[in-house]
Image (tube, rainbow, N blue to C red):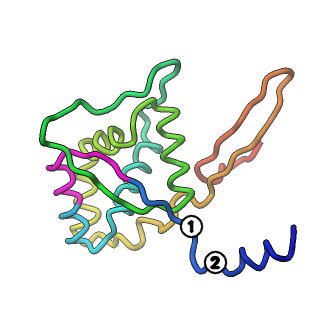
Amino acid sequence: MSKSFIKKYNKRKKPMSIMTTFNLKSSTKAKIDDISEKSQTSRSDIVIFLLHKIIHSKQNYCQKTKAVRYQRRLKNKWCKFHIRLQENDYEICLDLRKFCKKSISLLISEAFDLYFDELYNLFCNNLKIKHTVDNYPFINYFIIYEEIESAVCWKIYWGVPEITP
């Protein structure tokens, strides 16, 4: 590694973040904004919480050989939802889109419908949210390359496995 690269890398003040936009129903956006305001939690943290719930859900969201599904078009019911995500959180969004074959907007909407009560109780009813939600829930996100005979395998970890292969 060159010394100039190391100097530039060390001068970074904070982790990189990515601005992104989702389309949500205006009612869903209003509820997320309400929870954010009441709990003094960022909208990004709420979205990451919802995606985290999908990842750890026992339901099989993964699809194969299918086109990506989007939300149904609703005239005059959509709102643009702008948030800032850390790089690793954004990578999780890309993975979920790839594995679930659904747009992130659709996944957020579905997760919001499924987990609204838990989300509201956790964030708004003073249930010690600071200890429950990690600032970087996917900090241990990593990918391992492996060749098995003539097949190329990529293992994606969203957290540290108890027993690593």
Tell me the amino acid under the disc marked 1.
Answer: Met
Question: What range of the chain is rendered magenta?
Answer: 21-32
Residue 103, image x, y percentages: 39, 37
Q: Is residue 47 or residue 52 the one in the foreground?
A: 47
141 relative to 152, above or below = below
User: Does residue 60 show up?
Assistant: no
Which corner quadrant of the image does residue 32 belong to? bottom left
Decide whether residue 25 is among the magenta residues. Answer: yes
Q: Which residue is mark 2?
A: 12
Q: Is residue 140 or residue 85 the one in the foreground?
A: 85
Q: Residues within 10 Å of mark 1 (few under 14, many from 20)?
A: few
Q: Which quarter shows the C terminus?
A: top right
Tell me the amino acid under the disc marked 2.
Answer: Arg
Q: CA distance from mark 2 to mark 1?
A: 9 Å
User: Does residue 145 show up?
Assistant: yes
Residue 111, image x, y percentages: 32, 43
| Residue plotted at (22% across, 64% down) | 35
Q: Secondary structure at mark 1?
A: loop
Residue 104, image x, y percentages: 39, 42
Decide whether residue 11 is among the magenta residues. Answer: no
Q: Are marks 2 and 1 in contact (CB under 8 Å)?
A: yes
Q: Residues within 10 Å of mark 2 (few under 14, many from 20)?
A: few
Q: Secondary structure at mark 2?
A: loop
Q: Which residue is mark 1?
A: 16
| Residue plotted at (77% across, 39% down) | 145
Q: Residue furthest top?
A: 65
Q: Is residue 63 or residue 122 the one in the foreground?
A: 63
Q: Which quarter shows the N terminus?
A: bottom right
Residue 33, image x, y percentages: 21, 62
155 relative to 51, above or below = above
Q: Residue furthest front?
A: 4
Q: Which mark is residue 114?
A: none
